[in-house]
Image (tube, rainbow, N blue to C red):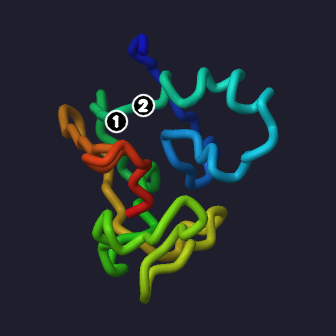
C-alpha cells in the first residue's frame, strides 16, 4: 500500500476503526468481498509517525486498551468476535482507552493480524 500523509486541522478526526476488513460480516455478499479484494489489500501493520507537536488534543486513541487480550484459539470461529471479558467499545467516543499524544518524531506501530491470518480485534 502506498504511504498516506494526513493532516488534521482543529476539529478533524476519525472515528475508531479497524485497519482491515471484517469480511465475516458479509458471508453472502460477494460484491463486498471482491471490492475489498478478498482482504488481500488489508493493512498488515500500521505505522504513525508524527511530524509536529500538538499542544492540545490530537490524540490517537486505542479504545480496547485495558481489556483482556484474546488468544487466537479463544475466539472459537469466524462468528465469535470477542473472548470472555472483552467487548466492543463505543467507536465514536474518546473517553476511554490508551491515548497517545502527538509529539514530533514520535512513531507508533501496531500489527492488524494474528499469526493465523485472522484480523486482530485486540
- Quarter-of-image position of residue 99: bottom left
The image quadrant where one finds the C terminus is: bottom left
Q: Is residue 109 above or below residue 63?
A: above
Judging depth in this view, the residue of 88 and 58 nearest the camera is 88
Judging depth in this view, the residue of 77 and 15 nearest the camera is 77
Q: Which residue is mark 1?
A: 46
- Residue 65: x and y, percent? 35, 71
Q: Is residue 110 left or right of residue 9?
A: left
Q: Is residue 18 above or below residue 33?
A: below
Contact? badges 2 and 1 (CB < 8 Å): yes
- Residue 102: x and y, percent? 32, 45
Tag nearer the camera, 2 or 1: 2
User: Farthest residue in the bottom direction?
Assistant: 85
User: For the residue carrying disc 1, how many other residues have a C-alpha within 10 Å: few (<14), some (14-19), or many (20+)?
Assistant: few
Q: Is residue 76 above or below residue 46?
A: below
Residue 43 marker: 2
Q: Is residue 56 left or right of residue 20?
A: left
Residue shown at 42% from the left, 15% from the top: 1
Residue shown at 46% from the left, 67% from the top: 63
User: Farthest residue in the top direction?
Assistant: 2
- Residue 24: x and y, percent? 63, 51
Judging depth in this view, the residue of 117 and 8 nearest the camera is 117
Residue shown at 30% from the left, 50% from the top: 114
- Residue 104: x and y, percent? 23, 35
Local SS, label 1: strand
Local SS, label 2: loop
Q: CA distance from mark 2 to mark 1?
A: 7 Å
Residue shown at 28% from the left, 69% from the top: 71
Amino acid at each position: 500500500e502506498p504511504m498516506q500523509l494526513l493532516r488534521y486541522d482543529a476539529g478533524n478526526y476519525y472515528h475508531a476503526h479497524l485497519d482491515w476488513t471484517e469480511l465475516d460480516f458479509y458471508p453472502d455478499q460477494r460484491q463486498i468481498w471482491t471490492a475489498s479484494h478478498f482482504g488481500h489489500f488489508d493493512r498488515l501493520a500500521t505505522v504513525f509517525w508524527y511530524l509536529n507537536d500538538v499542544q492540545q488534543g490530537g490524540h490517537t486513541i486505542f479504545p480496547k486498551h485495558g481489556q483482556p487480550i484474546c488468544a487466537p484459539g479463544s475466539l472459537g470461529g469466524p462468528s465469535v468476535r470477542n473472548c470472555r471479558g472483552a467487548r466492543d467499545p463505543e467507536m465514536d467516543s474518546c473517553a476511554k482507552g490508551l491515548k497517545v499524544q502527538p509529539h514530533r518524531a514520535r512513531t507508533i506501530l501496531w500489527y492488524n493480524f494474528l499469526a493465523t491470518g485472522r484480523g486482530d480485534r485486540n
